[in-house]
């Protein structure tokens, strides 16, 4: 027997299978209503955010905060942010950190999750418990800072990646999916003389595209959204990721900051705040369609069982 | 050791533990004892006040905190610094920025020019908001202190006295009395400014000045006009006016209740945070009858429905005021109020509520609680190095109308800024990218005392705004009272104040919203008496007795 | 196998177990400028102080109440949504709905609260409509009584789509031929869901449930801090806000560390118990027996 992808039977796209019964009218109508409501409730706020980001200052003032239909849409808010000088650089930093960080995180997580998913590996249970332990407790901010400093990582991009390299939750999820891969496949592979590495790359990974996509998305979003580590560990503003930079546009009115006149600080312009939301959001949204196919099409493992 | 008390003794825990904690604690930080501190705090001789006279403002400042006012940009800039302050060495500055960060040192021409002008190689650690209250202790714990560090009084930074004693330079002898003449720009700071930088009887850094007057209500005149303007002569009148303008989709006041109480407490003549009574004892404003009456009044206003029905933490109250659905909003100071409304709508000029005599009390205004936004302390070092760093701070405090100030705030003419029609410098795009962020950090560290200038206010009414706000400040200063505790140190304060004020704020919100009764206010304070408030008062009293 | 484990283990050792040592501040009166070595030891005083503070217990009570609501209403929501979306035939609609429902996850709590105000607040859309029609305005944003429901609704809105993604991945692993044979055997849509779909996601669901129980003392932080003034501390103080005030605002590092340890121990007990329960029902849980 050759080791390869087992026989897969993906769900036929867009077509009702012969065995499926035609939908009832009532059922379809109910579904349509529920979904429309859900979609509306989820998207309307975004339209408000988008519209407000495109509104002029006068219009925002006249509306008292949020604008639903800007009469004369303007990109002024975006221009203001993009003319800051550091934005391009910060986006580059964020994209690289997200890309490299996600790749490294996935590699480390997959390797450890695979090792822990196999029964009979010596020491795997205590290791798993040690990993779970990290979900429950948290090292304080100051010890982390001291550690990062002692490792010489202050002002280094590694300070944005290494402290969050493996997330125990992601690890446990991935391990659970790996464990669902039928034992028979491993047996077959072992009989064929395949080693761990071969089993991982030839069987486990191809069968786990869905969970890899999910965990990858979790990591990517975490790296993309992170600002606290950058705030703490990076002094050089030239190295700041986009999220930290964008936060400086929406500084809120903490009692003292509110009117520090000498430095012209004021509550942020609403359209700029909303443009910041959009700018922080758009790049990561672009990722989703690429990953989506891995959890809609489906990779079927049950086929070999049956 | 009278006051080296651990917080734990108050909580009824084993005194052995507490005593042990306290004594180890004191060994841990060398010579510093908070108990000695209060006594010594009082004896320090503040730097002489030598105002800058080479540039003459149109509206004169006063030692009482009235801002200088300029109606136009000075035609002839003067030189305030004789020689390059630095010695070419590396200097690290920990500060906070309130704008976007500047381009990094390597690609920032302005940064290079600052280095050249100051004669140093400046590395700036730019904290952001929020974040400073986390970054500061982390850096301190990391051990490598920056050469200059901005210490704000109200961001929850704890045990500053011990930090200063352990790691920072005592600059008293370099600036006390006439010694400050060596640093002429720093000499233009008033005694009130310097008081913030005094801890344990020693001066620790250069103050970061801020407008002297504290919180005020700024009102939208378009709303208050129908009630005959945003002013009142009694609580009844204020109440009636609030009711009158409220209706439809308009409400008289923003729903930040604690700010409402603190502003209106001025009408009742409440103390400004800490007050010294005739018999020498110290009282805290929230305990006073005046404050309680103001709270009760705010509760009545709330019942009458004049507060905007929104989130007490709402961030867009300013916008709602400019738009016209909120009548008045509390601002940090009068100039800030005017500036904000002009920014949102150049044709809108916030009116400032002058405190009125409420219910048989004599109104007063309150100075800004700290008089500054903190100070910048200097890392321990040789006298030569500390003096060099003081020279650098002296440069940063260059006054309005000096060449140095223009350079710091705007950079170089042509590339970083150009003069507008009214003759004021305006940053170019390059100036915005390079100058704005770094200047924000530098000016947080220290700067010259606040001045009113037309360029502060967007729109074309700048000169009028300067006159108006100057007039408001004059009126407020007539009755303004200081916070008696500024420049005095209480160990108990640093330990308990954070918790006390959080709990008090929670209770204010509960009482105003009707979740708790007014009758719970006084018992809350008698309880806090034994939980730390009495201790604070005693310590302040002792300190004030030694320096009336 | 060891080579596969090594990088991950090294990570946990260096970036978790080493800085975890910093939690000794739970037994200290820690001062950042003195350091871990020289800060005074106070034994169990921090623990005593925490346990004798009524505000701590109030925050624990609130936390547990919110956690219970989240478990009942929020926890199953993503699964329900995943099943609903999975039952769609048109892959285009499916993709569209999927990519829309997870959007709110990316909105900060500040904005979520502001947007809820915009709709449900006393001067929001609904209130203004009611007022225009002579009715009294809504009060849900400031009413401590309805606050738990409000909080839960906000969480559902924000994270239902995000939580759904894991289930989608699990559902995608279901072999379609199982449906076919079930249908041939005469099982209707509901029976197919019961006998094919749910068993396929049962393992993941139980695992997520156990993990959630381990985190039972975390119900959110910013969400509560932002709405504290609106409903009062009484209704909104949760363990994480309590820790924030003590650790950061009051500079009381020891108390912050103690609360963190307490949280971890409770979480460990919950995971241990829940996992045993899962085993009793023949499930995997998070770790095997």
Image (spheres, rainbow, N blue to C red):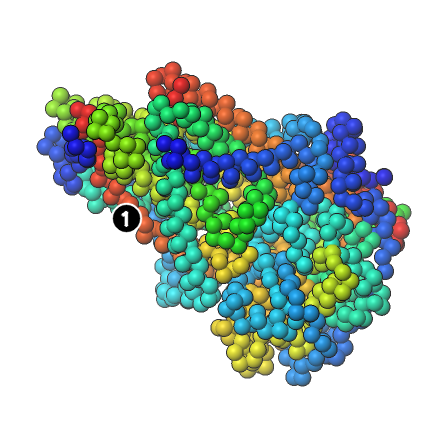
- Chain letter of mark 1 equals A
At 76% from the left and 77% from the top, the residue drawn is: B53
Q: Is residue B435 visible?
A: yes
Residue B211 position (above or below residue C120): below
Foreground pick, B307 / A212: A212
Classify mark 1: residues with Cα within 10 Å, few (<14), some (14-19) or many (20+): few
Q: Quadrant of residue C191?
A: top left
Residue reaching furthest left? A18
**At numbered mark 1, what does the secondary structure look like: helix, strand or loop?**
helix
Residue B508 point in image, percent of width and height: 65, 42
Q: On the rendered image, what quadrant is the C terminus of chain B found in? A: bottom right
At 75% from the left and 68% from the top, the residue drawn is: B186
Residue B156 position (above or below residue C189): below
Which residue is identified by label 1? A289
At 66% from the left and 44% from the top, the residue drawn is: C32
Residue B291 point in image, percent of width and height: 73, 47
Residue A162 point in image, percent of width and height: 47, 45
Residue reaching furthest front? A193
């Amino acid at each position: 027997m050759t080791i390869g992808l087992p026989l897969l039977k993906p769900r036929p796209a867009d077509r009702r299978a012969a065995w499926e019964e035609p939908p009832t009218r009532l059922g379809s109508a109910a579904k349509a209503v529920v979904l429309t409501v859900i979609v509306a409730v989820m998207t309307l706020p975004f339209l408000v955010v988008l519209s407000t980001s495109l509104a002029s200052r006068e219009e925002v003032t006249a509306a008292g905060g949020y604008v639903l239909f800007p009469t004369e849409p303007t990109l002024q808010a975006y221009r203001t942010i993009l003319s800051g000088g550091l934005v391009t650089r910060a986006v580059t930093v964020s994209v690289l950190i997200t890309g490299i960080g996600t790749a490294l995180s996935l590699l480390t997580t997959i390797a450890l999750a695979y090792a822990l998913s196999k029964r009979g590996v010596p020491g795997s249970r205590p290791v798993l418990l040690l990993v779970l332990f990290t979900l429950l407790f948290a090292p304080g901010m100051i010890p982390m800072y001291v550690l990062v400093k002692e490792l010489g990582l202050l002002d280094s991009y590694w300070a944005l990646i290494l402290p969050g390299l493996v997330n125990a939750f992601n690890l446990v999820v991935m391990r659970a999916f790996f464990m669902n891969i039928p034992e028979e496949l491993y047996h077959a592979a072992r009989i064929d003389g395949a080693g761990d590495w071969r089993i991982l790359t030839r069987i486990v990974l191809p069968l786990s595209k869905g969970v890899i996509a999910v965990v990858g998305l979790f990591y990517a979003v975490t790296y993309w959204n992170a600002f606290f580590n950058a705030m703490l560990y990076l002094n050089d503003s030239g190295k700041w990721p986009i999220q930290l930079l964008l936060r400086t546009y929406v500084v809120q009115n903490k009692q003292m900051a509110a009117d520090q006149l000498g430095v012209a600080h004021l509550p942020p312009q609403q359209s700029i705040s909303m443009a910041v939301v959009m700018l922080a959001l758009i790049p990561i949204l672009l990722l989703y369609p690429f990953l989506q196919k891995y959890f809609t099409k489906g990779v079927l493992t049950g086929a070999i069982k049956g | 050791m009278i006051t080296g008390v651990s917080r734990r003794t108050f909580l009824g825990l084993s005194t052995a533990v507490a005593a042990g904690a306290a004594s180890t604690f004191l060994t841990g930080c060398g010579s510093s004892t908070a108990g000695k501190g209060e006594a010594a705090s009082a004896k320090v001789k503040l730097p002489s006040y030598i105002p800058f006279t080479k540039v003459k403002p149109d509206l004169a400042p006063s030692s009482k905190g009235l801002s200088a006012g300029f109606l136009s940009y000075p035609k002839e800039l003067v030189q305030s610094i004789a020689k390059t302050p630095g010695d070419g060495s590396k200097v690290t500055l920990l500060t906070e920025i309130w704008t976007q960060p500047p381009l990094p040192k390597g690609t920032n021409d302005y940064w290079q020019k600052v280095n050249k002008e100051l004669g140093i190689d400046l590395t700036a650690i730019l904290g952001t908001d929020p974040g400073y209250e986390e970054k500061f202790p982390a850096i301190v714990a990391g051990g490598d202190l920056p050469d200059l560090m901005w210490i704000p009084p109200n961001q929850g930074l704890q045990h500053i006295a011990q930090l200063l004693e352990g790691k920072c330079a005592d600059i008293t002898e370099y600036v006390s009395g006439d010694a400050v003449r060596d640093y002429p720009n720093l000499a233009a700071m008033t005694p009130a400014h310097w008081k913030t930088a005094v801890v344990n009887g020693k001066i620790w850094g250069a103050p970061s000045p801020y407008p002297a007057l504290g919180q005020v209500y700024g009102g939208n005149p378009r709303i208050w006009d129908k009630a005959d303007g945003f002013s009142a002569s009694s609580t009844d009148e204020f109440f009636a006016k609030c009711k009158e303008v409220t209706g439809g989709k308009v409400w008289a006041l923003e729903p930040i209740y604690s700010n409402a109480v603190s502003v209106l407490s001025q009408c009742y003549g409440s103390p400004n945070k800490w007050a010294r009574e005739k018999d020498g004892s110290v009282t805290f404003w929230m305990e006073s009858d005046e404050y309680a009456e103001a709270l009760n009044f705010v509760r009545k206003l709330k019942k009458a429905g004049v507060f905007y029905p929104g989130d007490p933490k709402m961030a867009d109250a300013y916008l709602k005021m400019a738009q016209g659905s909120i009548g008045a909003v509390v601002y940090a100071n009068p100039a800030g109020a005017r500036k904000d409304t002009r920014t949102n709508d150049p044709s809108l000029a916030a009116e400032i509520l002058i405190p009125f005599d409420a219910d048989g009390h004599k109104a007063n205004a309150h100075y800004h609680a700290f008089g500054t936004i903190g100070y910048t302390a200097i890392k321990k070092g040789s006298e030569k190095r500390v003096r060099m760093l003081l020279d650098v701070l002296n440069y940063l405090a260059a006054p309005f109308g000096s060449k140095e100030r223009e350079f710091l705030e705007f950079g170089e003419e042509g590339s970083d800024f150009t003069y507008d029609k009214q003759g004021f410098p305006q940053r170019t795009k390059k100036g915005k990218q390079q100058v704005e962020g770094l200047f924000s950090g530098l000016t947080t560290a220290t700067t010259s005392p606040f001045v009113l200038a037309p360029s502060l206010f967007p729109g074309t009414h700048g000169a009028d705004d300067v006159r108006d706000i100057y007039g408001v400040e004059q009126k407020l200063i007539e009755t303004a009272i200081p916070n008696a505790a500024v420049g005095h140190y209480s160990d108990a304060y640093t330990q308990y104040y954070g918790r006390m004020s959080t709990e008090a704020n929670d209770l204010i919100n509960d009482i105003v919203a009707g979740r708790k009764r007014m009758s719970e206010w006084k018992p809350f304070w008698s309880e806090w008496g034994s939980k730390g408030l009495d201790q604070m008062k005693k310590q302040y009293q002792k300190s004030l007795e030694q320096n009336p | 196998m060891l080579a596969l484990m090594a990088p991950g283990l090294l990570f946990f050792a260096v970036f978790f177990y080493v800085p975890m040592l910093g939690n000794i501040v739970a037994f200290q009166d820690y001062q950042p400028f003195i350091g871990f070595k020289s800060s005074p030891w106070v034994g169990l005083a921090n623990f005593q102080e925490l346990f004798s503070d009524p505000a701590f217990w109030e925050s624990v009570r609130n936390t547990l109440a919110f956690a219970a609501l989240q478990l009942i209403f929020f926890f199953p929501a993503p699964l329900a949504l995943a099943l609903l979306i999975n039952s769609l035939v048109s892959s285009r609609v499916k993709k569209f709905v999927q990519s829309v429902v997870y959007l709110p996850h990316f909105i900060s709590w500040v904005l979520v609260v502001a947007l809820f105000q915009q709709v449900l607040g006393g001067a929001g859309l609904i209130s203004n409509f009611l007022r225009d029609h002579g009715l009294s305005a809504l009060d849900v944003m400031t009413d401590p009584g309805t606050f738990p429901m409000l909080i839960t609704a906000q969480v559902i809105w924000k994270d239902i789509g995000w939580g759904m993604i894991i289930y989608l991945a699990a559902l995608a692993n279901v072999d379609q031929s199982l449906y076919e044979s079930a249908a041939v055997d005469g099982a209707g849509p509901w029976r197919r869901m019961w006998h094919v779909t749910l068993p396929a996601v049962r393992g993941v669901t139980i695992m997520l449930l156990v993990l959630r129980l381990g985190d039972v003392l975390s119900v959110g932080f910013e969400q509560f801090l932002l709405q504290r003034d609106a409903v009062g501390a009484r209704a909104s103080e949760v363990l994480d806000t309590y820790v924030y005030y003590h650790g950061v605002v009051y500079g009381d590092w020891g108390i912050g560390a103690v609360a963190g340890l307490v949280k971890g121990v409770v979480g460990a007990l919950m995971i241990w118990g829940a996992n045993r329960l899962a085993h009793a029902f023949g499930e995997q849980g998070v770790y095997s027996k």
